[in-house]
Image (cartoon, rainbow, N blue to C red):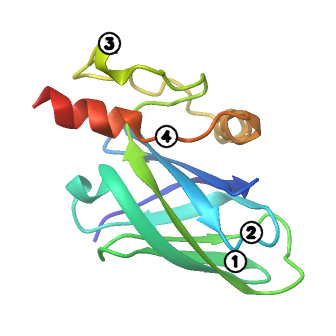
Amino acid sequence: MPSVRGFVQCSNDRLVGTFEVDGSPRYLYSDVKTLHQPFESGEATLTYDNITQLDGHCRWTGTVGKANILMDVVSGGVSIAAPLAAKQPSSHFILGEGAWDTVERISPPQKNISNVPVNPSPPHDAIRDPALKAARAKKLLESKNPIIMYAVQIRAAAH
């Protein structure tokens, strides 16, 4: 089972994960339920069976411990484990639903997805510095735009 290191941050009921898989960025954008305290880790480890598992819609469950997080994707074979940057006051169960994508989304999603051009080869992540990736993920979380899986829908419509 391959594994890669990355960054995970969760606040305001939104989770963003950034991982570089086979030289290309993979982002996990997810809404989170039952979040008690925001958390982040710059030392997250993503483990998966096949790269095709890191594309499209996903549901996951997890546990935020006092010093770490463990998330398992419901369909199986994908997990994220990480030490937390700051200790939590207590452990709790979390769950979420979102999408894997290869495109960073900082700007608001398009309102009319039927007019959005499809780029079969999204740009590669030029940022290699973990601190810069963490700053970018923080910017994603702090934006007040809802996370919408429009890119997944565009991809499906293009086939």
Q: Quadrant of residue 33?
A: bottom right
* Rendered residue at 46%/71% (across/down): 60
Sequence-first tag of 3 and 2: 2
Q: Secondary structure at mark 3?
A: helix
Residue at 72 percent of width and 83 percent of height: 65
Q: Earlier in the sequence, mark 4 or mark 3?
A: 3
Q: Which label is found at residue 84?
A: 2
Q: Amino acid at mark 2?
A: Leu
Task: Determine contact: label 3, label 2, CB under 8 Å.
Answer: no
Q: Which residue is mark 1?
A: 68
Residue 42: x, y in percent? 67, 55
Q: Measure the C-alpha gap from mark 2 to mark 4.
A: 26 Å
User: In 3D space, how far apart are the residues under numbered discs 4 and 3 (Cα atoms)?
Assistant: 16 Å
Between the residue at mark 1 and the residue at mark 2, the CA separation in whole angstroms equals 5 Å
Q: Quadrant of the N terminus?
A: bottom left
User: Which disc number belongs to residue 115?
Assistant: 3
Which part of the image, by quadrant, shows the C terminus? top left
Left or right of 87 in this view: 19 = left
**Which amino acid is tagged 3?**
Asn
**Counting other residues with Cα less than 10 Å from the Cα at mark 3, is it few (<14), some (14-19), or many (20 or more)?**
few
Location of residue 76 (image quadrant):
bottom left
Q: Secondary structure at mark 1?
A: strand
**Contact flag, marks 2 and 4 (Cβ < 8 Å):** no
Considering only vertical position in the picture, is 118 above or below 46?
Answer: above
Q: Is residue 26 left or right of residue 53?
A: right
As drawn, the label of residue 148 is: 4
